[in-house]
Image: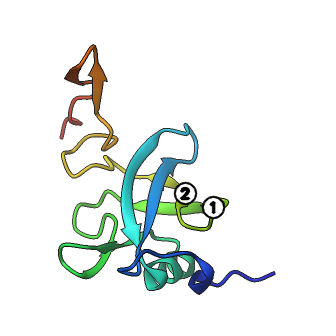
Amino acid sequence: MSFDPATLRYDARGLIPTIAQDAETGEVLMMAWMNSDAVARTLETGRVTYRSRSREAFWVKGESSGHVQELVSLRLDCDRDCLLLQVRQTGPACHTNRRSCFYTEVRDGAEVEIMAPVEA
């Protein structure tokens, strides 16, 4: 059975939430949005391509920073309305220069940064 990105369940803006996970460690790296064309481009090229909501444009992860995400696998959730990408991450995944965008934890009602930026 072949896969068609058009069969996914996108929101009213034509977007689907997408979680990037390190394929080796299982660490959750980031969450971003894709549309049908971004999914197709990612599958075609093996380079993860997102859809920027603020710029209304495609965003190939690492295109300007060099912090590339290479696709290992693409998984669909049971409702077909969320994607899980397992990736090989080069460098930090977060624009704050941290390994993961999930670097703040709530502990005892307070926000605590649990991950420092990567040294350049």
Residue 99 x, y percent position in the rendering: 33, 40
Instruction: Please tell me which residue is depicted at 26% across the width and 82% down the height of the picture.
Output: 57
Say few, some or many: other residues with alpha carbon within 10 Å of mark 1 (under 14 / 14 to 19 / 20 or more).
few
Q: Is residue 75 above or below residue 43?
A: above
The number of callouts visible is 2
The earlier-in-sequence mark between 2 and 1 is: 1
Give 54 or 109, whichever is nearer the viewer.
109
Instruction: Please tell me which residue is depicted at 54% across the width and 66% down the height of the picture.
Output: 81
Residue 60 x, y percent position in the rendering: 34, 72
The residue at which mark 1 appears reads as 75
Amino acid residing under circle 2: Leu
Q: Is mark 2 on a helix, strand or loop?
A: strand
Instruction: Please tell me which residue is depicted at 57% across the width and 86% down the height of the picture.
Output: 6
Q: In which quarter of the view is residue 1 placed? A: bottom right
Q: In this view, does 74 lie above or below 103?
A: below
Instruction: Please tell me which residue is depicted at 22% across the width and 29% down the height of the picture.
Output: 116
Q: Name the residue furthest right.
A: 1
| 91 left or right, relative to 19 | left
Q: Is mark 1 on a helix, strand or loop?
A: strand
The residue at which mark 2 appears reads as 84
Q: In which quarter of the view is residue 97 placed? A: top left
As drawn, the label of residue 109 is: none
Give 110 or 119, whichever is nearer the viewer.
110
Amino acid residing under circle 1: Arg
Residue 74 x, y percent position in the rendering: 60, 64
Q: Is residue 11 above or below residue 101?
A: below
| 113 left or right, relative to 92 | left
Say few, some or many: other residues with alpha carbon within 10 Å of mark 2 (under 14 / 14 to 19 / 20 or more).
some
| 12 left or right, relative to 116 | right
